[in-house]
Structure formats: C-alpha cells, structure tokens
Amino acid sequence: MITDRARGDILGDHLVRDDLRRPLGTKPVPSPAAHATDMTSASLTPRLTTDDDLLGMRLAHRVILRDVTRLRELADRMLADPSSFDRARYAATADYVGLFVASLHHHHNVEDLALWPLITASAGPHVDFTELTDDHDELDPLLDELGEFTRGLPDPAAVAGFARTLRTLSEHLHEHIADEERTVFPLITGHVSADAWQRFEKDAQRGGRADFDLTRFFAVMTEDETERVRRELPLPVRLMVAVFPRRQRRRERAVFG
C-alpha cells in the first residue's frame, strides 16, 4: 500500500524527472486555468501613459518657448530700431501678448488644479510639487507685468519694461519647463493610466483659444508628428485646422513681420 507521503514522494520525483527531460531554456506549459488567471490579471491592469501619449504636453511647452523667444527678439528690435514699428504694429503686439499671457495662465492653472492632483492620486502623497508651484507663483506676476507694459506701448518706458520683462520671463520659462519635463514626465508614465491621461487632456482643452493655440501647435510639429496628429483628429477639428491657420498667419505677420 502506498502511503500519502510515499505518493507525494513519487509525484515529486516524477515532476523532477519530467523537468529534467525538458530541453534547456524551455518552460513548462501552464495549465488552461493558470493561463486564464494570467489573462484576467492582465486585463484588469490599466495601461499606463506612454511617452508618445505626452506629445500634447511637449507641444504646449515647445509653443511657449517658441513664443517667448520670438517676443524677446521682437522687444530687442523695438529698442534697437523704433522706426520699424508703427502704432498698428504696437497694437497688434499688445493683442498677441494678451493671447499669449491668457494661454500661459490657463496652462499653469491646469497644472496646479488638475495635473498635480492627478499625479498625486496615482503615485501617492509623497510626491511634492512645491517647487513647480512656486515657479508658477513667480511666473504669473511676470506675465501680468508683461501685459501691462504692452498696453503702454509705444511709450519708451513701456518699451524698456517690455524688453526687460521678456528677458526675465524667457530665462525663467526655459529653466522651469526643463525642470518640469525632467521630473513630472517620468511620474506620469510611471503611475498615471492612459485613460486618466486622456480625460485630463480633454478637460485641459476647455477654456483655451483653439484659433490661437491649435495653429501654434502645428507650427512646432515635426512632419511625423503632424501626420500622426492629423490621423487622430476628429473630422470637426480637422476642418478647424484647415481654416484657423490663415487667421493666425495674419495675426503673426502683423506682429513679427
């Protein structure tokens, strides 16, 4: 009579011997039940945000840096050659800066009120955004100051203040955005689900100016990015993309020439 212990020894010996008979580097075939369990676990695990999913945020940052650089160069030209600016161009500059300031305020508000809480909820309360929030607290008054100076153009004091503020703002924005992408992007791809990120991006678009923001995004895309984005855009947005650039080009020509 084979005892329970002996039966276990024989079964164990059989498993060992069966394992030895398998070619090196192969794995035992899982049972159907185990395979089903693995599939269920995988289906319950949400897909995390990928680096490709962050294209919208990267484009927003590129647009900000492109605009602040162009405006800084414009202010330097105002100082060096005031004769190349008439009242119409000063007025167009004030309008453009007003849109730029509103867009950047919106970007910061979305991060402070929606993105930071989303990451904290996904990664845990140990995440600290104090430095980035402090940056926003320093940048936002500079933006307001910039708007005030543009409304005073072409007064020489306003031109000087406009140029001075843009130099400071440009330096701060380049440093802030580099810090943000280095610290925040890995937190998003490491912890935030793709579904949550898509909902965040959809909500973030509310309150923006499509005729201003969307066309500026396309201006900083590579050819591959443009092709990818156009494929993914719904038809109504594709129609807007076909119309808005003409308006934006007129707006930019009036400012930058």
Image (cartoon, rainbow, N blue to C red):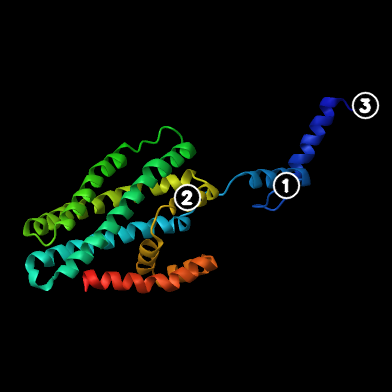
Label disc, if present, on residue 35 of the rendered structure = 1
Q: Relative to 126, is 192 on the left or the right?
A: right
Q: Which residue is mark 2?
A: 203
- How far is mark 3 from mark 1, CA to CA? 36 Å
On the image, the x and y values in percent for residue 108 come to 34, 47
Looking at the figure, which quarter contains the N terminus? top right
Vertical comparison of 177 with 72: above or below: above
Quarter of the image with the C terminus in it: bottom left
For the residues carrying marks 3 and 1, which lies nearer the camera in this image? 1
Q: CA distance from mark 2 to mark 1?
A: 38 Å
- Residue at x-position 21% and y-position 53%: 147
Q: In the structure shown, which secondary structural element does the residue marked by tag 1 occupy?
A: helix
Write down the residue under mark 3.
1
The nearer-to-camera label among 3 and 2 is 2
Q: Earlier in the sequence, mark 3 or mark 2?
A: 3
- Residue 137 visible? The answer is yes
